[in-house]
Amino acid sequence: MNLILLGAPGAGKGTQAEFICEKFKIPAVSTGNILRAAVKDGTEMGLKAKSFMDAGALVPDEVIIGILKDRLAEPDCANGFILDGVPRTIAQAEAIERMGIRIDKVLELSVPDEVIEQRMSGRRVCEKCGATYHIQSKRSKVEGVCDACGGKLMIRKDDEPATVRDRLAAYHAQTEPLVEFYKERGVLTVIESQPTIEANTRLVMAALEA
Ligand code: AMP
């Protein structure tokens, strides 16, 4: 099963991707995580991407398309994958089609902007493996320490309120048109935001099993 999770930053794509990975035994591909690792390692790609990321802007399509081509060619993606945070523009979606990749389902996690802004202030991310937590809704077992790898939990630089507003603006202008793009292709399901992670997961799983 080849899936896409669409939704604003902080909509819960990464969290739901973890549940889907576990249940369907397919990898999650997050261009955000790949880019953050590249920035941390100081690679050429990371240096190119950093200024866009810090400003809450999208990284140029050609960089993202290159990353995606390489990642989807890896053997663990052969039986399916979940795209988390990609595509984010029509050009990226068209590039996926040109690669000859079939998309079976697209789930849009629809969350009002005010809820996003509240949520983002409590988000924490593991500096080592990229796993995400929330100080209220998704706590780690030991405060400040990643359950998965023991890494230190940090606030993402681009989760500061002003940057979050820029990222939401980028989402509405550049990514939201993908909702219509995938609706036209008959693969879209909209998941309206629920008060708890578990309630969202139930709707996500129901949509995948339908
Ligand atoms: P994320 O972790 O998905 O919220 O991504 C963090 C940042 O990485 C974004 O704000 C963008 O600057 C960049 N990024 C990640 N994925 C993409 C993408 N598909 N297209 C453009 N920029 C991206």
Image: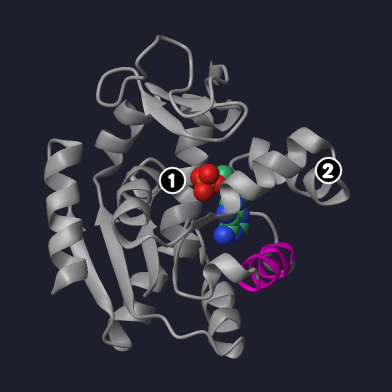
Left or right: 26, with 138 as reference point? right
Crowding at label 2, few (<14), some or many (≥20) Cα neighbours within 10 Å? some
In the rendered image, the vertical position of residue 157 relative to residue 183, given as above or below = above
Mark closest to the chain's N terminus, 2 or 1? 2
Residue located beneath label 1 in the image: 168
* Of residues 68 and 92, the one drawn nearer to the viewer in this rendering: 68
Magenta stretch contains residue 72: yes
**Residue name at image x 37 percent, y 55 percent:** 21
**Residue name at image x 75 percent, y 39 percent:** 39
Across and down, in percent, residue 58 comes to 61, 53
Ligand 1 closer than 8 Å to the CB at disc 2? no
* Residue 193 visible (yes or no): no
Separation of residues labelled 2 and 1 (CA atoms): 23 Å
Mark number, residue 7: none
Residue located beneath label 2 in the image: 47
| Range of magenta residues | 63-73
Residue 195 image-quadrant placement: top left
**Residue name at image x 32 percent, y 29 percent:** 119
Disc nearest the viewer among 2 and 1 = 2
Mark 1: secondary structure: helix
Left or right: 105, with 191 as reference point? right
Residue 118 image-quadrant placement: top left
* Of residues 187 and 54, the one drawn nearer to the viewer in this rendering: 187
